[in-house]
Amino acid sequence: MKIVFLTTEDPLYLPAFFKRVLSEHAEETSAVFVVPPLYGAQTPLRAAWRYYRTFGFAGVGGLLAHILRAKSRRQSIARVCEQKGVACASISDVNTPEFLDRLRELETDVVVSVSCPQIFKRPLIDLPARGCLNIHGAALPHYRGVMPSFWMLANGEREAGVSIYFVNEQIDAGELCGQKLFPIHPNETLDGFLRRSKALAAELLIDVLRKMERGELTRTPLDLSKGSYYSWPDAVAVRRFRAAGHRVW
């Protein structure tokens, strides 16, 4: 089985994720492709401004401090790939005909999206023989959309989850093939929550890929009428998040 990962540049949480997954699946991984951590036509300046407007100076300061610390330790997806002997390259758009040709040249069996901020179009979804998987940091169909980890903490949930599903052209929709629930700790930081969530997601993906190889994977259509959808948090949500005893860092 030939696996291709589509992900985004993130020195904080994803290097550990890929270190764990590639420890099991480096030989089957044809390549890891990294896209910019931006949504749609967003620029780095607009992304930074939105983060500042939401989480304030302390939030931005904490983010910069953690990024600088991670980079000083040379934490990156590319470095993990180098250590595991897996090809890693940067791309700008996963839906271009040129990139799809590249996936065909790699004879891709399955595409795995890991925090990739780009919406997959039908030609990409239909290309891999065994389908396109996406990892979402919530118990789908609940908490579809943006920043599910933040919203679960802000809403006072006691239990969280991670899900893996075969994508379609809708957002966080398709056929569920793996899910794991876990408790939320009181007064947990968003940073700590994300680290736990990504670690559990890595283990879940290893299990899903193992079942796929054995032909034992089940697929259950997600019923979106029973779920919920959230967009980028506003100031009211951030106040609720902090009132619940949580911090970003």
Image (spheres, rainbow, N blue to C red):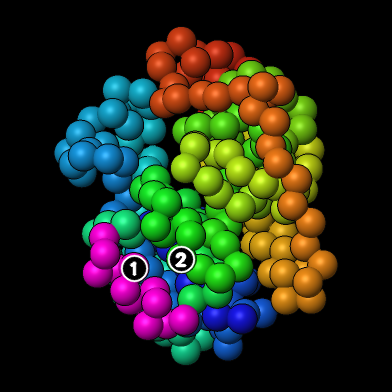
Q: Which residues are magenta?
A: 96-107
Q: Residue 54: x percent and y percent?
A: 36, 23
> Which element carries disc 1, helix, strand or loop?
helix
Q: Tell me, yes or no, whether the two marked residues, 1 and 2, touch with CB atoms within 8 Å.
A: yes
Q: Which residue is mark 2?
A: 127
> Is any atom of residue 12 visible in this view?
no
Q: Is residue 100 magenta?
A: yes
Horizontal side of residue 13 vs 23, given as left or right? left
> Is any atom of residue 100 visible in this view?
yes
Can you say whether 27 is above or below 110 in the image? Answer: below
Can you say whether 205 is above or below 60 in the image? Answer: below
Name the residue nearer the viewer: 154 or 66.
Answer: 154
Which amino acid type corresponds to the residue marked 1 in the rendered image?
A: Leu
Q: Residue 194: x percent and y percent?
A: 58, 45
Q: Residue 82: x percent and y percent?
A: 42, 84
**Residue at the right extreme of this rendering:** 216
In terms of image quadrants, where is residue 51?
A: top left
Which amino acid type corresponds to the residue marked 2 in the rendered image?
A: Leu
Task: Tell me which secondary structure the magenta stretch mostly adopts.
Answer: helix
The N terminus - image quarter: bottom right
> Which element carries disc 2, helix, strand or loop?
loop
Identified at 51% across, 85% down, the residue is 84
Q: Which residue is mark 1?
A: 100
Q: Which comes sooner in the sequence, label 1 or label 2?
A: 1
